[in-house]
Amino acid sequence: MGCDGGTIPKRHELVKGPRKVEKVDKNAELVAQWYYCTLSQEELRRPIVACELGRLYNKDAIIEFLLDKSSDKSLVQAASYIRSIKNVTELNLADNPAWKGDKGNTKGDKYDDIQCARFICPVVGLEMNGRHRFCFLRNCGCVFSERALKEIKTEVCHRCGVPFQEEDVIILNGNKEDVEVLKKRMEERRLKSKVGKKSKKCKAAESVSQQDTTEDSPGPSEVKTAKDDMKTNSGERKQIVFTKSAEANGSSSASGKISKASSGTTKRSIADNQEKSEAYKSIFTSHSSAKRSKEESSNWITHTAYYF
């Protein structure tokens, strides 16, 4: 029959040593990071977005996640820092002309080339398959290889011409150190935005209070109009006083003229009366002298007649 005698066990069967660490296949990891969505684990399809930590998502999956966060706890914890659609950026990717996809693989017997990627760098031409470091600009969403940004140092996007800074460059699917740096930048950016919102709210409240105070109290234009009204009133009063004084002066001058005219007329009337009296006197004296001459002549005639 055999195998009925004693057996000699080996050492690895008797002594249990530490378990070997399971090594993750790098190719499978790269494929999972660069070809599939981090949330839904589905193949990446446009529109494709990236978070502030450099992870790739389908935009539809992000919208569903924001609408319903009770689907999977592990996914919620992994994307807990995504609070709104503003926390992700839609990517402007350049298509790879050599990538054919699943067009010729109808039977499933075609070799799938992992190194052939769907997108490439528009400046250098490197394929975005995980073998090379890629990054995107948070301002415009254009994707470039890190080699292109290092070789051609500019402060303007190579594709659309939007200006950017070093803080706006986010590395896609970076290592742990890159993720820590991006987390610090994200926290600083959010703190600045909160402070800016608080300052805007304070300014808005101050402006509202100032508007209320300005509605209650007269403004500078109203003060100016009031001052102008006072000036016009004072000017009108001065004009009235001036006209009254002018009328008084005119009346006094007119009365003076009238008095002068009356005095002149009285003097003329007196002179006329005197002339008339002198005329009457001359006439009376002439009449009386004529009478006297007649009487004398008559008396002389009588006397001569008497003598004769």
Image: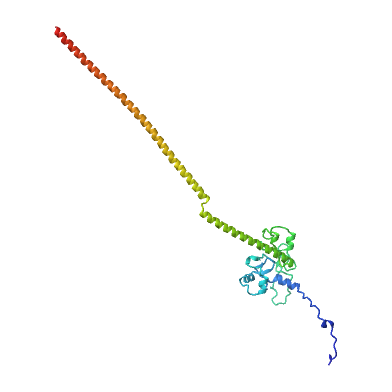
- Residue at 63% across, 60% down: 196
In this view, which residue lies farthest toward the top? 308
- Residue at 51% across, 49% down: 223
Taking depth in this image into account, of 57 and 76 the one nearest to the observer is 76
Report the quarter where the C terminus lies: top left
Residue 279: quarter of image: top left
Identify whether 235 is placed above or below 152: above
Residue 237: quarter of image: top left
Identify whether 123 is placed above or below 224: below
Residue 143 visible? The answer is no
Residue 101: quarter of image: bottom right
As drawn, is 84 to the left or to the right of 222?
Answer: right
As drawn, is 270 to the left or to the right of 216?
Answer: left
- What is the tally of numbered marks visible in this picture? 0
Report the quarter where the N terminus lies: bottom right
Residue 189 visible? The answer is yes
Percent across and percent down for residue 13 are 82, 83
Identify whether 133 is placed above or below 104: above
Percent across and percent down for residue 93 are 68, 65
In this view, which residue lies farthest toward the bottom? 1
Percent across and percent down for residue 23 are 77, 74
Taking depth in this image into account, of 111 and 145 the one nearest to the observer is 145
